[in-house]
Image: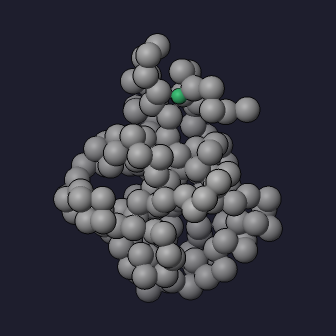
Amino acid sequence: MGLRQVLVDHDVSDLERMFPGWKGLQHYELRTDTADKDIVTYACANGLTIVTANGPDFQAAIRTHIKLTKKSECFRLFGLIVVPNQAAVRTSALKDFYRKLKALGYSLAKVNNNNLLVKVMVNGRVTVSEPFKRCPHCTHYD
Ligand SMILES: [Zn+2]
């Protein structure tokens, strides 16, 4: 697998400068005021992992989206990374992010493949969970 693409929500667009391959809404020709549910739809269609500080709203939007699954169509998502809302601590909290993810036994590709939820705390602690129902149509999961 090559480098997975990441969509960075507008409220945390400073992270575009920190991580190569993490691209903001404009990169995908989305308006900066695009609704959460439309960002989720776009991420679904394009295999993108979403990065946001707005965890609860995006988790709800992902759950709603997966429920739209039809027999003929896949509505799977590709992971959600929730980062601190406070810009002043965001950069330090995300220092060594990939190393911390690896130490937990994960990679960005695994987060993407399995639609995992990654939370980065203010103190830099990283947790990974699998709270989302799998797309019923999907055979991508093992
Ligand atoms: Zn599916």
Closer to the camera in the image, 49 or 58: 49
Relative placement, left or right, of 6 versus 42 is right
Q: How many marks?
A: 0
For residue 21, say whether it is visible: yes
Relative placement, left or right, of 17 versus 140 is left
Closer to the camera in the image, 14 or 27: 27
Q: Answer above or below: position of 128 versus 23.
A: above
Closer to the camera in the image, 37 or 98: 98
For residue 53, say whether it is visible: no
Relative placement, left or right, of 29 versus 64 is left
Residue at 60% across / 59% down in the picture?
2
Q: Answer above or below: position of 34 versus 12.
A: above
- Give x and y (percent) for residue 29: 23, 59
Residue at 44% across / 76% down in the picture?
15
Residue at 62% across / 45% down in the picture?
113
Q: Answer above or below: position of 55 versus 90.
A: above
- Give x and y (percent) for residue 110: 67, 51
Relative placement, left or right, of 29 versus 106 is left
Q: Outermost residue toward the front?
A: 2
Q: Quadrant of the C terminus?
A: top right
Residue at 36% across / 73% down in the picture?
13
Q: Answer above or below: position of 126 versus 15.
A: above
Quadrant of res 62: top left
